[in-house]
Image: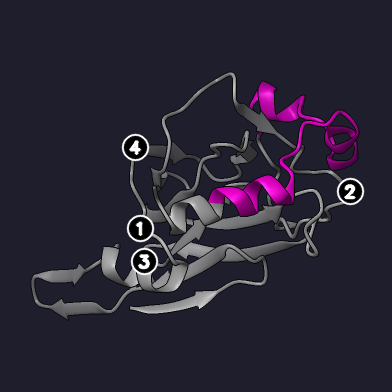
Amino acid sequence: MDVVELAVPGAWMFTPRQLRDDRGVFLEWFKAELFTKHVGHPLTAAQANQSVSRRGTLRGIHYADVPPGQAKYVSCARGAVLDIIVDLRVGSATFGTHAAVRLDDVDRRAVYLSEGLGHAFVALEDDSVVSYLVSTPYDPNAEHGVHPLDPELALPWPDDLAPVLSAKDAAAPTLAAARTAGALPSNAACEERGAQLRSPA
């Protein structure tokens, strides 16, 4: 498995080795030892989620309060999505920047995003299946969003798709509004959380 840190610090891309024969394909889509080596701490999965989306469905930008935050290990088991990770950590040197990765059932890559980073994707094909390992259970009171079509972010959504958003995502604030409201995680809190994970008590 090849591991590459993305342009947004705290985010990585994992590309597995695929073994093919006349029966099909076998791969290791998550390896704890390799994950810990690169990220610096283990991933404790508290919940596993899965979504099925038709072409054009845009989910996100989602993030959770820090602490504790919610880290995600995301892969696409069927179809294809454009996955985007956004730095929402106020005070980060890369605040407001993003990294985009195509996740599909060809290369079978996965991405990991640390606590405090925002996550969104758009389905490029019908019936695209996205699976997530998440570090904390879903808490509706701690879950928030930033509008994925915010012009300030200028995310590289495909021009040939009409995005389909949930009512909740369509009503999400812009990055500037979320920052003004004090709704975004601070870089200091995210760094403290990362240090706790690297050196558990």
Label 3 or label 1, whichever comes before in sequence order: 3
Nearer to the camera, 28 or 34: 34
Cα gap from disc 3 to disc 4, whole angstroms: 17 Å
Identify the residue shown where x is 41% and y is 42%.
134
The 10 Å Cα crowd at callout 3, few under 14, some 14 to 19, many 20 or more, is few
Which is more foreground, mark 2 or mark 1?
1
Magenta region = 165-193
Tell me the quarter of the image containing the N terminus.
Answer: bottom left
Q: Residue beneath label 2, please?
A: 151
| Residues at circles 3 and 1 in contact by the CB criterion of under 8 Å | yes
The 10 Å Cα crowd at callout 1, few under 14, some 14 to 19, many 20 or more, is some
Nearer to the camera, 125 or 89: 89
Q: Residue beneath label 3, please?
A: 36
Identify the residue shown where x is 68% and y is 50%.
161
Cα gap from disc 4 to disc 2, whole angstroms: 34 Å
Q: Residue furthest top?
A: 141
Which is more foreground, mark 3 or mark 4?
3
